[in-house]
Amino acid sequence: MGGFLNRFLQRYFRNIFRNRSHVRLGLYGPPNAGKSTLANRICKDWLGQEMSTVSAIPHETREIQIKEQVSIKNKNGKTLSFSLVDTPGIATKIDYEDFIKKGLKEAVAKKRAKEATKGVIESIKWLDSMDAVAVVLDATQDPFSQVNITIVGNLQARNIPVLIVANKIDLRRAKLNKVKAAFPQYEVVGVSAKTGTNVDDFYNTLFKLVG
Amino acid sequence: MVTFHFVPYHEIEDLNSTRRINKLMGIIKQDKIVVLEGQLQKEEEAILIESTMNDINDEFKGIELAVIYPEKQRMDTMKRLRLDIARFLVGNRQGFTIVGPASIVKKVRQNPSSIELFTQEARKRRKR
């Protein structure tokens, strides 16, 4: 009961004090779904510079990255400004031996694993600070993973607007329809953050979500 | 050998979120797979992940988690309403939650009505 009241009050006060000119847009999702690649795509398109480093080794982003004052424009000339928050990937397991298999030395792998666990905790803690979230999923992977469902469920429980981004649609194994079937109650946009395919659709949907 | 530990919902219904998670983590740390009647709240699933991250070390690599539940989207409004009322009155007893240590459960494949658990070979577990 106490938890329910606490959540209710949190939501109530967040809605009262939410400043629409300073919307905080979070990029959430499992590791290696392309959150940082999408963050870089947005920043390159609208600010001319990248914000995060990307890597084929999972958990490259281990700290919250924030780019303030990103402004995007739609065809009608309307502007949407937000702070873009690139978050570490949320996972339920982190094994340093997986990093060793990717070519890292043991000490480096253990350090990365330790930092990655802290990153997951940070991502979860930051959920309450978001005004809207794009959940970035790898469209070549099974969308029915519990991590994805837990992330979306937590956003729903906090009344935070959600957009599902099915990334990597440039790859032949990508199954956009499967992602749509997994989250029928949400808007799903298929993009390739790497090549820029369909990113305009993503921007248009963002306007619908928080504009 | 893999051990499944069944936790009926009544064993957790009077516990607060922290104690629920501690109870489940205690079982998982004994290298058992928890089969929980019903579901945790979504916020509790997030706490479970946080708690797991805090506990990860060279031996404990994390968990695999899966929830099987009735698909609300495919229900008509009356059935959904009845389910919501039942949930409010008697707790989230619908479905099952499976949580196991990642050293035993290698992978979980799930869709709304089935779960497949892929376990690590015992030889590999011993090597770790």
Image (tube, coloured by chain):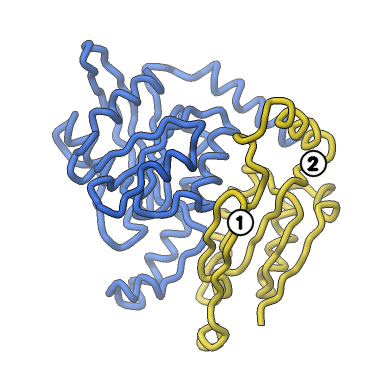
Chain colours: A blue, B yellow
Give the SS element for disc 1. strand
Chain of the residue where label 2 is placed in the rendered structure: B
- Pointers 1 and 2 in contact (C-beta within 8 Å): no
Would you place residue A101 above or below residue A144 in this image? below
Give the residue at the far left of this rendering: A48
Above-or-below relation of A187 to A51? above
Q: Nearer the viewer, residue A205 or A60?
A: A205
**First reached walking from the N terminus: tag 1 or tag 2:** 2
The reply to whether label 1 and label 2 mark residues of one chain is yes
Question: At label 2, which amino acid type do we have?
Answer: Gly
- Which quarter of the rendered picture does the C terminus of chain A lie within? top left
Q: Nearer the viewer, residue A16 or B26?
A: B26
Question: Which numbered tag is attached to residue A39?
Answer: none
- Residue B55: x, y in percent? 58, 65
Which of label 1 and label 2 is nearer to you?
Answer: 1
Q: Depth check: B74 or A59 in front?
A: B74
Instruction: Kindly report the distance in space between the C-alpha atoms of the residues bearing marks 1 and 2.
Output: 22 Å
Q: Secondary structure at mark 2?
A: loop
Quarter of the view holding residue B22 = bottom right
Disc 1 marks which amino acid?
Ser
- Percent coordinates x, y for residue B69 in the rendering: 66, 47
Q: Which residue is mark 2?
A: B91
Residue displayed at 66% across by 33% down: B75
Q: Is residue A80 left or right of residue B35?
A: left
The image shows residue A52 at horizontal and vertical percentages of 26, 46
Q: Which residue is mark 1?
A: B114
Q: Quadrant of the N terminus of chain A?
A: top right
At horizontal 67% and vertical 68% (from top left) the residue drawn is B33
Left or right, A9 with respect to A160, comes to right
Q: Which chain contains the residue that carries disc 1? A: B
Residue at image location 52% in from the left, 60% down from the top: B109
The image quarter containing residue B7 is bottom right
